[in-house]
């Protein structure tokens, strides 16, 4: 099926990049342009939907969590306008539930940040049932744990006691983890 989608896309290398991290978005746009894509960027769900509606791209890289909503809303609009488009969903908060939701809505692949341009290009251009090769530098288990704790902490409005309760962790242990730098 993916071979058919790539054949339908032909030489169209239009790419929508949607992320609210402006420095990351600029770096990724430059890297993808060097790889031959015709890049258009957006920083909000509203801007992403506007691009997907007016000029549906052949490819899209969409951040899951944005300041004004959920990137999956843009995936739905893009799927309605251009069903053969190849979409990669990016997120700093890797979770199985969101990966399943992204794929059910029509995402081609799901990558956790930090993903580099090579990982993203491989995911966008993967053919058939071939999976893209695993990332060269995947997140360590310590980093995944730290990211999860940070996510829950943010969802609890930075309330240490509430975060510790939800993570079933002692509050002082959580405070020590939050005081340290993120692992690599």
Image (cartoon, rainbow, N blue to C red):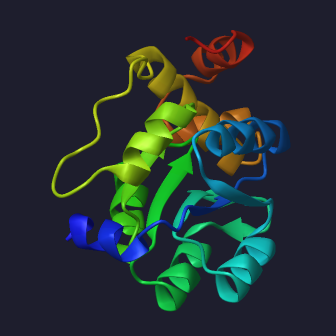
Q: Quadrant of the N terminus?
A: bottom left
Q: Tell me, yes or no, if residue 115 can be seen here.
A: no
Which residue in the rendered view is the most extreme toward the right?
22
Q: Position of residue 144 (x, y in %)?
A: 46, 27
Direction from residue 183 to residue 28 in the image, left or right: right
The relative height of residue 36 versus residue 13 in the rendered view (above or below) is: above
Quadrant housing residue 54? bottom right
At 52% from the left and 68% from the top, the residue drawn is 12
Q: Tell me, yes or no, if residue 156 can be seen here.
A: yes
Q: Quadrant of the C terminus?
A: top right
The relative height of residue 135 versus residue 47 in the rendered view (above or below) is: above
Q: Position of residue 26 (x, y in %)?
A: 80, 41
Give whichever of 46, 141 is nearer the camera.
46
Which residue in the rendered view is the most extreme toward the left?
129
Q: Position of residue 4 (x, y in %)?
A: 24, 73
Q: Position of residue 181 (x, y in %)?
A: 69, 10
């Amino acid at each position: 099926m993916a071979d058919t989608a790539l054949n339908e896309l032909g030489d169209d290398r239009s790419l929508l990049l949607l992320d609210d991290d402006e420095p990351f978005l600029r770096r990724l746009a430059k890297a993808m342009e060097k790889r031959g894509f015709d890049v258009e960027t957006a920083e909000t769900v509203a801007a992403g939907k506007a691009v997907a509606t007016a000029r549906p791209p052949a490819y899209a890289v969409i951040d899951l969590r944005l300041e004004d909503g959920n990137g999956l809303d843009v995936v739905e609009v893009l799927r309605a306008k251009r069903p053969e488009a190849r979409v990669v969903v990016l997120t700093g908060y890797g979770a199985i539930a969101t990966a399943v939701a992204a794929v059910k809505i029509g995402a081609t692949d799901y990558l956790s940040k930090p993903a580099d341009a090579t990982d993203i290009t491989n995911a966008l251009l993967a053919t058939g049932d071939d999976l893209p090769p695993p990332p060269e530098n995947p997140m360590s288990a310590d980093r995944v744990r730290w990211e999860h704790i940070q996510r829950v902490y943010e969802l609890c409005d930075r309330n240490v006691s509430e975060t510790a309760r939800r993570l079933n962790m002692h509050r002082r242990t959580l405070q020590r983890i939050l005081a340290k730098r993120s692992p690599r």
